[in-house]
Amino acid sequence: MSDQPHKFGFDTLQIHAGARPDPATGARQTPIYQTTAYVFRDAEHAAALFNLQEVGYIYSRLTNPTVAVLQERVATLEGGAGAVCCSSGHAAQIMALFPLMGPGLNVVVSTRLYGGSITQFSQTIRRFGWQARFVDFDDMDAVAAAIDDDTRAIFCESIANPGGYITDLDAAAKVADKAGIPLIVDNTSATPYLCRPIEHGATLVVHSMTKFLTGNGTVTGGVVVDSGTFDWSASDKFPSLSQPEPAYHGLKFHETFGPLAFTFHGIAIGLRDLGMTLNPQAAHYTLMGIETLSLRMQRHCENAEKVAAWLEQQPAVAGVTYAGLKSSPYHERMTRICPKGAGGLFTVTLKGGYDACVKFVESLELFSHVANLGDTRSLVIHPASTTHRQLEPDQLVAAGAAPETVRISIGIEDTADIIADLDQALQKAAG
Ligand SMILES: *Cc1c(COP(=O)(O)O)cnc(C)c1O
């Protein structure tokens, strides 16, 4: 026997991390703590909780035991120190930026992002006085050049939605490190089963748990995971974390909570004052989903590889962007960033253009035409006319959502059935 303590593997952690039998009843499955508030032992206990001198439950806008299990589970799977769940993936992005940003400050972001994120960054965050600078992350010199004294983070997706591009996270982390700012990675399309951005140098990882983590299209949810490794006090750039916080009698989050500073700030300030809270019912569905994450991701990848390879051979198809294909310019990078597989998401370009795409989407029968991805069901959408509708033509092309492109999220059904449905729809689109 070795002296090293045994470390559980991913398949075990996705079922057990953060959970223990309910101390009150012995319930084996994590109960849904459907409660707004928690009874204080006495006035002193209440005061200690409110002062952050003791960790415990006050009110479910801040903390809830079901949500806490999910936070610990995702943090463990990502290899982070802590996590804060929120009401959606978009909420998680605001929660990740909120402690870092302020009026006049900027974040350098990839042009290859989920369409909703491009709109959130290019339009809505400007109302807070924040600015996003869009750069092609295949050009790390351009990323470095876009950073100035007012930059507080860089943001990209590991496997980018919708195009399936893979970001060189190690190179991005190097650029962030050199500038003394955190790298934030949206790991929604990859999940921690395929990619663990913290191992590639990311400081923060965000997810839309709506997608593969829950995996069956039942909830909207998000999470921010903190690696716990960033030194918030190394410069004067992050006063929310390094300087006295007036709302807590001058408490300094980094000095007091060390590697959990970002997580505690996210709960004590972010959830308390922005209120983007995940509800316990949604946390329950997500916990159920995560129990089978590795099995589903293996099947998503297996199916996507076969379907993408088949599509590539079809005469009506101009191109397929799946990084799991040997023909993909991102294939080599995939073997380094997400060696277990390139996920279930890619785009197909049809030779028939915009009209063929619309006909194709409308002709599919097993596939559902929805604005979602990462479901057990195969899903399809035409980004240019839906999710990416708000974007300018050049933004569409940069994001991999050109008008002649269809986004496909491959489910875990029988591969032959998925291909048969695509086959009949391609024929109708061509005819
Ligand atoms: C869906 C999605 C989001 C937004 O998440 P919501 O849960 O819908 O708010 C962010 N990033 C990526 C990559 C997504 O796919």
Image (cartoon, grey):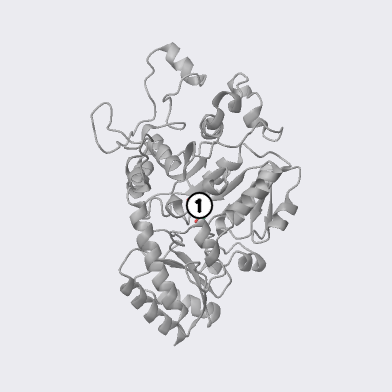
> Could you tell me which residue is drawn at 66 percent across and 40 percent down?
101
Q: In which quarter of the image is the C terminus?
A: bottom left
Q: How many labels does the image show?
A: 1
Tag 1 secondary structure? loop
Seen in the picture, residue 401 relative to 101 is either above or below; the reply is below
Q: Which x, y percent locates residue 8? A: 35, 42
Q: Which x, y percent locates residue 39? A: 36, 20
Seen in the picture, residue 281 relative to 314 is either above or below; the reply is above
Query: For mark 1, does the 10 Å Cα neighbourhood hold few (<14), some (14 to 19), or many (20 or more) residues?
Result: many
Residue 163 visible: no
Q: Is residue 52 left or right of residue 182?
A: left
Residue 204 visible: yes
Seen in the picture, residue 292 relative to 236 is either above or below; the reply is below
Viewer-proximal residue among 172 and 396: 172
> Could you tell me which residue is drawn at 24 percent across and 34 percent down?
27
Viewer-proximal residue among 298 and 124: 298
Q: Which x, y percent locates residue 364? A: 39, 74
Q: Quadrant of the N terminus?
A: top left
> Could you tell me which residue is drawn at 53 percent across and 39 percent down?
227
Viewer-proximal residue among 415 and 116: 415
CB of mark 1 near ligand 1 (< 8 Å): no
Q: Which residue lies furthest to the front in this view?
A: 1
Q: Residue 117 falls in which quadrant of the image?
A: bottom right
Q: Specify the amino acid type for callout 1.
A: Asn
Q: In this view, does 176 lie to the left or right of 351?
A: right
> Could you tell me which residue is drawn at 71 percent across and 40 percent down?
103
Q: Which residue lies furthest to the bottom in this view?
A: 431
Task: Report the residue marked by disc 1.
Answer: 187
Seen in the picture, residue 211 relative to 347 is either above or below; the reply is above
